[in-house]
Image (cartoon, coloured by chain):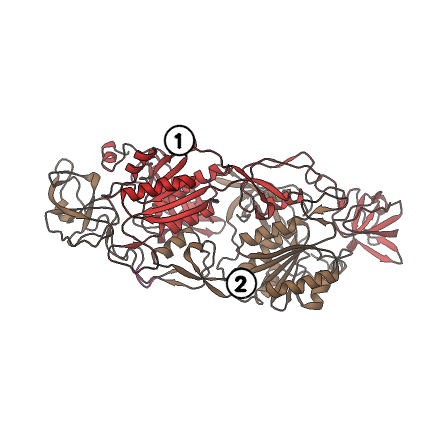
Chain colours: A red, B brown
Amino acid sequence: MIKLEKLRKIGFSKLTPLEDALKKLFSHIHLNPIEEIEINSALNRILANDIICEIDIPPFDRSAMDGYAILAEDSFGASPKNPKSIKLIGITEIGESSTLKLNKGEGIRISTGAPTPKGADAVIKIEDTEIENNIINLYISLPPGKNISKQGEDIKIGTQVLDKGTELKAEHIALLTSLGFKNLEVRANTTVSIFSSGDELLEPGNTLLPGKIYNSNTPMISALVNLYGGEVIRGETVKDDKNVIKNRLVEAAEDSQIIIFTGGTSVGTKDYLPEVITESGIVLTHGVAQRPGAPVLIGLLSDTLIFCLPGTPVAAYVSFLKIAGLAIRNMMGCSILDPRSETIAEISRDVPVSGLGYIHYLRVIVEKSKNKFIAIPLKLKGSGVISSLTKSDGIVEIPPFKEGLRKGEKVIVKLFPR
Amino acid sequence: MIKLEKLRKIGFSKLTPLEDALKKLFSHIHLNPIEEIEINSALNRILANDIICEIDIPPFDRSAMDGYAILAEDSFGASPKNPKSIKLIGITEIGESSTLKLNKGEGIRISTGAPTPKGADAVIKIEDTEIENNIINLYISLPPGKNISKQGEDIKIGTQVLDKGTELKAEHIALLTSLGFKNLEVRANTTVSIFSSGDELLEPGNTLLPGKIYNSNTPMISALVNLYGGEVIRGETVKDDKNVIKNRLVEAAEDSQIIIFTGGTSVGTKDYLPEVITESGIVLTHGVAQRPGAPVLIGLLSDTLIFCLPGTPVAAYVSFLKIAGLAIRNMMGCSILDPRSETIAEISRDVPVSGLGYIHYLRVIVEKSKNKFIAIPLKLKGSGVISSLTKSDGIVEIPPFKEGLRKGEKVIVKLFPR
């Protein structure tokens, strides 16, 4: 259990369960405006409207094979030893609406995708025939309808084919293009400003000085925002100075829908951030019952959502995945807020949990063993260890009131976003 | 078994097993040149060199908590009922190399990430203390080393931290930045030209005419190339005209490392592509033992790889995933050629296979049921059905000489690229 007097010491009046923090957060989210884009740039965008099919797919009966359009009954009884014969009367070309009409005893050469000529009710594959002097020998017997894709067989006119909130991938783009879409309405990408604070932070390219470390949080969060479909409009390191932080926050709130701050949320000697947000905006939640990542602060500055994530990289990383990233996607109307792939694995050893009441995020390596996956927890110290992320494949969540995991227990691994 | 006389009829002398086709293909691949980029634009790029850590991470002993730096022995025997007392002698600020030296009986206020002062060997968390008049009461007993991240604890200088061929994601970017990298050597993205051929193809935005369909292959393949890290430099629909195709191919080969053609590879009445490639270049493989996707042609035009994929969208899609996509990533030196996530599932029903000798690609929906995944095969007709992709989650591969799947059998589902 999380003891209240301990929490007060570390600057939180209470730790909020993650679920409650998200519920409160989502109640402050507005959908981004809709914008029209060309379908060529639709990859990874979020569909703004349901899509109703306004044509039949395929739009006409067509051949699914290269061969001859025939009347099925002309092939009845045909076999390699007892072929049936019909007469070739022409070719129907792909992309053309044929004027040919097929009668009993006749065949028409046809390619995959070409419209089936009037009168034909089947297509015999070329490898099941032989032709000599315009006489086609049929070596197999076909039922009516064979090798013909009927108009509307894939999708009937009026069908809802995609739901709003779909994240558009190659297959959705193919579907939309086949319906004739050239432009498309999607939700605007969420605009995000990223700040890191900490006087120990040095920008890469500079010489490492005593007591300093390179700032890896801004580039890391920036990459995550991109992976989640947001648009980074600003990425800066700011001094641990209350006025500087305040000014930059207020400025960024004017053109950003979301501000993500790393560092400066706990009770270090110079952690001004909670103070600044209390003065200039509203603190929705300060302190979430998760490990790592407890010191998260969620706030509002006019309409801009502010997420102050811990400065330790792993805590910042998981807090992004579990909180800030979901807000970015929620604003875009995504139907799947958490884009990570899941796999089910057996945990390789007992994992005790200290600190009931917190969600624990366990970094694991996933290995395939015969026809199952094994999740191997990393041995590590602290949430500052970036290599614990590069060495592992994903995260197993241990719910707040579960007393650890037993070796062999099945767990869900959420793989890192890719 | 695939009968030879049948294959001859459909224009192939033989169908090559996928494995052999890939082996031959990969023997013609050269690595892309190395280019230097800023780390801010490194997301999804492929690391060109192994990365050796040239500093210790962390670069100095630092506090993992907000609290007081102490000598652990001063806390020995301390408990809430029997606190030990020490004297506060100062603050060590984050980002500074402290000149303070700690002696027995003394404590120094310290924030997470600040260097531990000389003489201190532990940090006590602020919530395990109380302070009054510069006297710090310690309420717990700490072992030496507690709450201190030792220099080099995460990564020791000289360690190889990332391997060449790594696809850079948020966590790798964080690691590289923490090592001080500002610029980075990566492999150039593979340049790809995309063509679709077919007189039935109409560009979106035009009115649908009899016998015509909208060309969905160019935008689909274009999205896939982007997802696989390639760079699309050209996307066109060309007429089914031998000279036009030949001229466009030769032109594109000058500035593309890969050309992907969809349509025109089988034995329809107007399929010129195999002819054109035989005349102007080399055919490496024509016909692969896979379903859908058998009519794939792999060729070379000087140094440019040419992939002619079937015109039916699903066949084009899976042939990209299994062949062309791997070539794109192989050229960039990716250590993981197939980027798709895998999950293990139980198949929901018997799946018979007709046509031993082919790899079969089964489209499945994946559903979570208790602590396992169920793979539900789609019922469908033909490989032209785009909605079979948008309705499913991934592909189960049935190996060439396996006689189908039994209900309840465990299968690997390769999820669609995301």
Q: Which residues are magenta?
A: B155-159
B129 lies above or below B400? above
Q: Nearer the viewer, residue A32 or B362?
A: A32
Is the residue under label 1 in contact with that under label 2 (CB below 8 Å)? no
At horizontal 13% and vertical 43% (from top left) the residue drawn is B77
Q: Magenta includes B416? A: no
Chain letter, disc 2 residue: B
Chain letter, disc 1 residue: A
Which residue in the protein does label 1 denote? A24
The picture places residue B147, in percent across and down from the top left corner, at 23, 48
B331 lies above or below A375? below
Q: Secondary structure at mark 2?
A: helix
Does the image show residue B402?
no
Q: Nearer the viewer, residue A65 or A194?
A: A194
Asked if both marks, 2 and 1, belong to the same chain, the answer given is no
The picture places residue B56, in percent across and down from the top left corner, at 29, 59
Relative placement, left or right, of A365 versus A57 is: left
Tell me the amino acid under the disc marked 1: Lys
Q: Secondary structure at mark 1?
A: helix
Does the image show residue B387?
yes
Tell me the amino acid under the disc marked 2: Met
